[in-house]
Amino acid sequence: MVIPGNKINATHISLFYRALRSLRVLPLVILSLLAADVFAGPELYGADLKIGPVVKQSDRIFLSFRIVAYPKNDIVEAIRRGIVVKISYEVEVIKGSLIDFFVKDTVVRRRIKRSVKYDYWNKAFLIEEGRKKTICHNEEAMFRAFFEVQDMEMILPAISEGDRYYLRYRAVLKSVDMYFPMNYIFKYIVGIWDFDTGWIKGPSLDEVR
């Protein structure tokens, strides 16, 4: 479309072709970000999951774990600016194969979802986990309530003789929800504090007492 009073010159044409060339490399950028997301370890995201004690009582186990080495300052700044930060914890009982890298089956899965936001009126952090609400008036209390899981209960299934079972843990923190491919492009700009620990292998059930 030609705008009256304006003429298309060499500069306009040059800018147009530059835009076209940039679109050509967009798939390569997306593929690079996908590869980084698949093969990256927890260290890329600046957080890790530390496994605590596992206690067995009859047909139940109680798990404790926490997130360590996360970017505290970035997360606090984001929350205070009004961003709702969400974290999802997953623990699975896995039936393993002879080779540790492979997994035969997921026997039991337990997931905990939490969110935290800042309440400007009360000058406090509000953490929600289902219907449970926790109010924290300082940052350290908020970090403990948000990034630590204590005595999470899991009911053990019937275990087959000769099979090997073990636990694995994962935590994913998100602050911005976007759709593909924008989630891979913009998460490094607006969600630089987001992380995914990946699956962390825990003890086998034979080791749990």
Image (spheres, grey):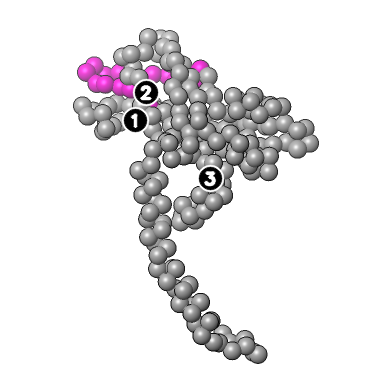
- Camera-nearest residue between 61 and 197: 197
Residues under numbered marks 3 and 1 in contact, where contact means CB atoms less than 8 Å apart: no
Q: Earlier in the sequence, mark 2 or mark 3?
A: 3
The amino acid sitting under disc 1 is: Thr
* 130 vs 192: above or below: above
Q: Quadrant of the C terminus?
A: top left
Bounds of the magenta span?
151-168
Q: Disc 2 and disc 3: Cα gap in Å?
A: 28 Å
The percent position of residue 1, horizontal first and vertical second, equals: 56, 85
Q: Nearer the viewer, mark 3 or mark 1?
A: 3
* 7 vs 126: above or below: below
Q: Disc 3 and disc 1: Cα gap in Å?
A: 31 Å
The percent position of residue 182, horizontal first and vertical second, equals: 49, 56
State whether residue 90 appears in this view.
no
State the image quarter where residue 138 is shown: top right
Q: Is residue 97 left or right of residue 170?
A: left
Residues under numbered marks 1 and 2 in contact, where contact means CB atoms less than 8 Å apart: no
State the image quarter where residue 146 is shown: top right
- Camera-nearest residue between 44 and 207: 44
> What residue lies at 68% left-to-right and 39% top-to-bottom?
80
Secondary structure found at label 3: loop
Residue 202, labelled with which disc? 2
Q: Is residue 207 left or right of residue 187?
A: left
Please tell me how many numbered marks the rendered image carries.
3
Q: Nearer the viewer, mark 1 or mark 2?
A: 2
Mark 2 residue crowding within 10 angstroms, few (<14) / some (14–19) / many (20+): some
The amino acid sitting under disc 3 is: Ile
* 183 vs 166: above or below: below
- Camera-nearest residue between 190 and 65: 190
Residue at the disc numbered 3: 192
Residue at the disc numbered 1: 106
Q: Nearer the viewer, mark 2 or mark 3?
A: 3
